Amino acid sequence: MTQIRERTVLFADLRGSTALFETLGNAEATSVVTHTVGVIAQAVDECNGQLIKTLGDGLMAVFEGPADGVKSAIRMHEMLERVVARGKQRGASPGLRGLKLQVALARGEVVEMGGDCFGDAVNVAARLIDHAGDNETLITAEVLNGLTAARKNRFRSLDRIAVRGRVEPVHVYVYDQPMQQGDAAATQFGEVVPAVEPDGIRLVWQDLDRVFDTASMPIVLGRSVQATYCITDGRVSRSHARIDWHAGTFSLTDLSYNGTFVRFGPLGEILSLKRGNCTLHGSGVIGLGGPPMDNDSPTVRFEVLHFSDTEPLSLTGPRSRG
């Protein structure tokens, strides 16, 4: 029987499973991934949702209302944290300890048919996963509108993001979580609290020289023509990395499978994000898919700007506002 209903659609994707297959072998890795997906799937039942299907290292579920969907997403992250924590206590492989979760939710009319669901909300939620960083939950404005004021305050706007296969951009929000202790490694070279908030950021790749102010955030760097900063190189993912403006700083989040690498200054150490994030400050280079010194990897130069300063000195070339 075919039915059309208003639903909140959730997609969850477990990242890092490839490393498990490399370290544990196919049989054991399959068992670990299947068990982990089964654990996070319990959050669907707990929050009155319906599990539509599992997708190898992910799942799809639907909920009557946005609140239950968001609550389920939060529970999934908590459950994965417990799985990883138990693994650390028992000396599990680095692959298991490195598992991360991305969750995306959208809301709209859904066609329910043969135990599956179809529709624009399904497509949007599935594609939003590409824009999520490690342990992030992304939602659309339609989901946000169905939340209580207290829950809404836990989300911050990423503004409108172009989603693959959709003409109109989607207004996306990210769930703000306190920094975990494990995040320190991703910010050890880059976490600097500036005395004065910056006004913009300049990005230079070949002849593509653009300046973005804080109102232009987020910036998606990627190969897709819909990316904010399009890098037409086959080694770059469609949505490779994202620059956000939050709490007075620019934050770079890796969204790719091959990683994003940052070097601050001409002689700084290389910071490997690998689905992590860091704060951008000063000037430096961003390697997409490989370290900046790797000639095979496209490299974007960046400079965090204070428009009250004189002309920036570290980058050359004409300036144009983005």
Image: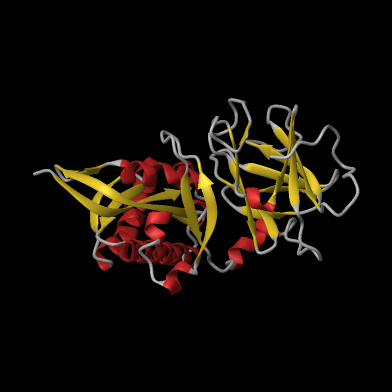
Q: How many numbered dots are placed on residues in this image?
A: 0
Tell me where residue 94 appears, x and y as whole percent: 53, 54
Q: Residue at x 72, y 34 (%)?
A: 299
Farthest residue toward the left?
1
Query: With 99 as the anchor, is 29 left or right in this view?
Result: left
Farthest residue toward the bottom?
150
Q: Is residue 136 visible?
A: no
State the image quarter where residue 294 is shown.
Answer: top right
Q: How is the image coloured?
A: secondary structure
Q: Nearer the viewer, residue 46 or 195?
A: 195
Q: Residue at x 89, y 44 (%)?
A: 311
Q: Is residue 219 visible?
A: yes
Tell me where residue 135 appears, x and y as whole percent: 49, 57
Q: Nearer the viewer, residue 141 or 36?
A: 141
Tell me where residue 50 appears, x and y as whole percent: 22, 57
Quadrant that contains the N terminus = top left
Tell me where residue 261 appears, x and y as whole percent: 68, 43
